[in-house]
Image: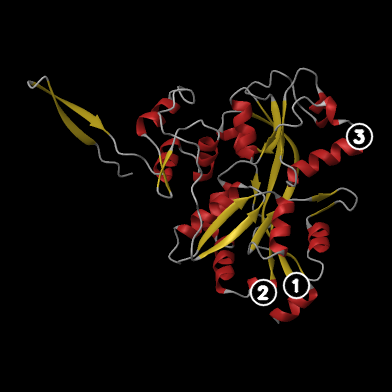
Amino acid sequence: MSNPVKREHLLISGRSRITITKRPPLTPEEAAQILKISRYTLYELIKRGEIPSWRVGRKIRIDYDSLMHYLQGDSGEKRPRGYSDAQEDVSSDNGFCFMGSHDLSVELLAEFLNHSSSSLSLKTVFKGSMQGLVALYHREAQVTGIHLWDEKLQEYNLPFVEHILLAEAYKVVNLVQRTQGWIVAAGNKHNINSWEDITKKGCRFVNRQRGSGTRLRIDQYLLENNIPVRQIQGYEIEEQTHWGVALKVANGEADFGIGIQFAAQRMGLDFVPLFKERFDLVILQETAEKPEWQQIQAVVNSIAFKRAVEQHSGYDTSLTGKIVYETPHSAKARS
């Protein structure tokens, strides 16, 4: 990483000269590289005030010394004047918009595209599975990612897609299969081991936002077992991403929540698996015929992408890139 040191020379009382070593501000990419986390995890830390940042136009910059304080466990409270929480605008004139559920594989897909020889970049907006499907229907996004479980039909995603995209031609393509479970503090001192522990007294739960596939799974369990939400301490506390849930637990603001295995591992937390799920991409046929989608599909089907995903715990790429379902008129249009 190129980050040259800037030296400033100051004269003190007209005689002594001292040299102050000062590093220039870091970009989000440089800071993420230092912390060995993804750029999107870094944005979550910035949004929560864990890492101070400021804007230069539309760009985010991070003070090197502040980042070092964060690494040493001294962050959050002593924020330089003029710093503010921010999240970089990742839009692009040549981009496809992904709006849907949060997953590490989507972050990796965006990184692969952004560093490929093509001019395509993937703008990612993590809003939850249901919001993603609705955005796709309204043409506010070109592709969405979902993991919605239908308890009655014992099926992932397709019942919801068929309901919302009733009169549309579309494809459903698997991105990954992944394991979700309890994210708990290292040592699991509260002994959180099963779904039944969601009502354990004295334990603070952190929830996911309404409309997310994880929230739907949680609420389905509560409904099936006639558990009123008032029995769950922290049910009303919501986070937008798996990283947000893990950060709450890591900071001691919550004792447990549901998320992906890698988020727990990355934050040095324990993980108790609960279920394996299918995370699918959904795209309209009118978009699937465009060259941009072909570039995305090429990355998803590549060995390099699959290997990158498999390096992270809790992921299975055996179905990655496979068409799970396409509407009959979509199949005709392709033939």
Disc 3 residue type? Asn
* Alpha carbon separation for disc pair 3 and 1: 37 Å
Image coords of residue 297 (percent x, y): 59, 65
Cα distance in 3D space between marks 2 and 3: 42 Å
Q: Is any atom of residue 193 visible in this view?
A: yes
- Give SS at disc 3: loop
Q: Which mark is residue 237?
A: none
Horizontal side, residue 301 vs residue 168: left or right: left
Q: Secondary structure at mark 2?
A: helix
Task: Mark 2: give few (<14), some (14-19) or many (20+) Cα within 10 Å.
Answer: few
Residue shown at 86% from the left, 35% from the top: 222
Residue beneath label 1, please?
169
Disc 1 marks a residue whose amino acid type is: Ala
Q: Position of residue 294 (x, y in %)?
A: 57, 70
User: Of label 3 and label 1, which has the lower sequence position?
Assistant: 1
Compared to residue 327, the image places residue 42 above or below, namely above
The numbered mark at residue 286 is 2
Specify the amino acid type for callout 2: Glu
Q: Height in image: 182 above or below 301?
A: above
In the rendered image of this protein, does residue 150 appear above or below residue 24? below
Q: Position of residue 45 (x, y in %)?
A: 52, 35
- Quadrant in the picture for the N terminus: top left
Q: Which mark is residue 225?
A: 3
Look at the numbered discs 2 and 3 and tell me whether their residues touch, using CB distance below 8 Å.
no
Q: Which quadrant of the view contains residue 8?
A: top left
- Marks 2 and 1, the one that precedes in the sequence: 1
Q: Are marks 2 and 1 in contact (CB under 8 Å)?
A: yes
In-front residue for pair 259/91: 91
Q: Residue at x 81, y 57 (%)?
A: 160
| Residue 173 showing in the rendered view | no
Q: Which image quarter is the C terminus in?
A: bottom right
Q: Say which residue appears at 64% left-offset and 47% top-offset.
A: 102
